[in-house]
Image: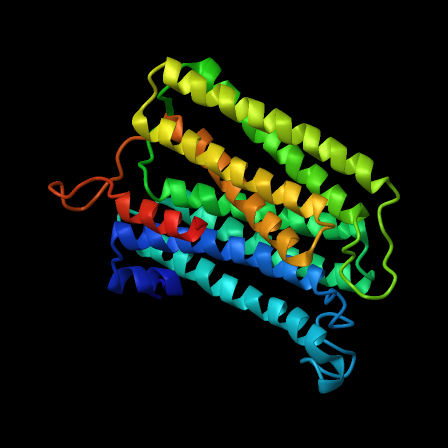
Amino acid sequence: MPNTLNPLELIARHWQPSARFVRRAALATVVMAVIIVVTGGAVRLTESGLGCSTWPKCTPDSLTPTAAMGINGLIEFGNRMLTYVLCAVIGLFIIAARARAPRRRALTRLGWAQFWIVMGNAVWGGIVVLTGLNPYLVAAHFLLTSALLTVAVLSWQRAKEGDEEPRDVVARPVRQLSWLLVVATGALTVIGTVVTGTGPHAGDAHKVHRIPLNWQEVTQLHVDFVYVVVGLSVALWFALRAVKAPAAARRTALELLGCIALQGVIGYVQYFSGLPEIVVGLHMLGSTLVWIAVLRVALALRERGPLQVDDPAAPAVDAAPDAQLASAASR
């Protein structure tokens, strides 16, 4: 009996996407992860967290929102539907990575990791609704989305480079400084979720349980960690200049400083203006851009060789279009 080919194998036999297509598909997963964060914030900031009163249906008797639920039901249901768009984009990346020759198992594994994070977070989001927006579960919901963004950025980076063992392009202490920056920024993100859990934007117009901590004290802790991240970022930039790191690495560090400066301005505006919804939403967008920039700096300090291509005469890596797309997405 002949072996039965799975659908991905069949596609790979009839379609050979270019390396650029795979990279752009990977970048699309990054963009979609950012959109999911922003739209999830919109659900909270418009008090639509319980716009759909149950899960997986929107109401006990309807899969979709009813007219009586108003705009809040539409916003919450729309955010749920966006998950399918995200899955479609991730699916495109998985198919393209699998069809691309030579086959790169590490790349397809990263694609599947994104898919399973989305599935797990969708179930977790349902639990959040069923528990009436428990603030601890809401915080974990956001952190799972941050994990998705992390894997998406790693997928984008791996789509642009080869599969050799990673080699440092700077002295090891500088690399260690970059990873310390990643840890500090991760801690900043976690504290930010606690600030949200204690703050006024509970996600629904009705009374919702909040984390029993002083909002202003937690906010001050968050600000303290901002200074830590800023200090580490500046130190890393000077270190890269001192060791004459490659221009690309120094450029990513400078981009990070720009993102942090913009995020700092937004943070102070939202604090001193009483946390207006639109500014809080921009702050959430800024947090994703800072996290992307931090990861890009850390990943720029090692190399894995050129990307293998079918045509030896073709350039190994053509990252310029991707850089332009990323720059446009960050504006």
Residue at 71% across, 44% down: 272
Residue 238 vertical placement versus 203 (above, below): above
Q: Quadrant of residue 16?
A: bottom left
Residue at 57% across, 58% down: 36
Residue 59 in the image, given as x and y percentages of width and height: 76, 78
Q: Quadrant of residue 160?
A: top left
Residue 43 vertical placement versus 244 (above, below): below
Residue 22 in the image, given as x and y percentages of width and height: 33, 52
Residue at 64% across, 61% down: 42
Residue at 44% across, 31% down: 297
Taking depth in this image into account, of 2 and 24 the one nearest to the observer is: 24
Q: Is residue 254 found left or right of 35 in the rendered image?
A: left
Q: Is residue 18 visible?
A: yes
Residue 234 in the image, given as x and y percentages of width and height: 50, 23
Residue 134 in the image, given as x and y percentages of width and height: 81, 55
Taking depth in this image into account, of 40 and 125 the one nearest to the observer is: 40
Residue 238 vertical placement versus 60 (above, below): above
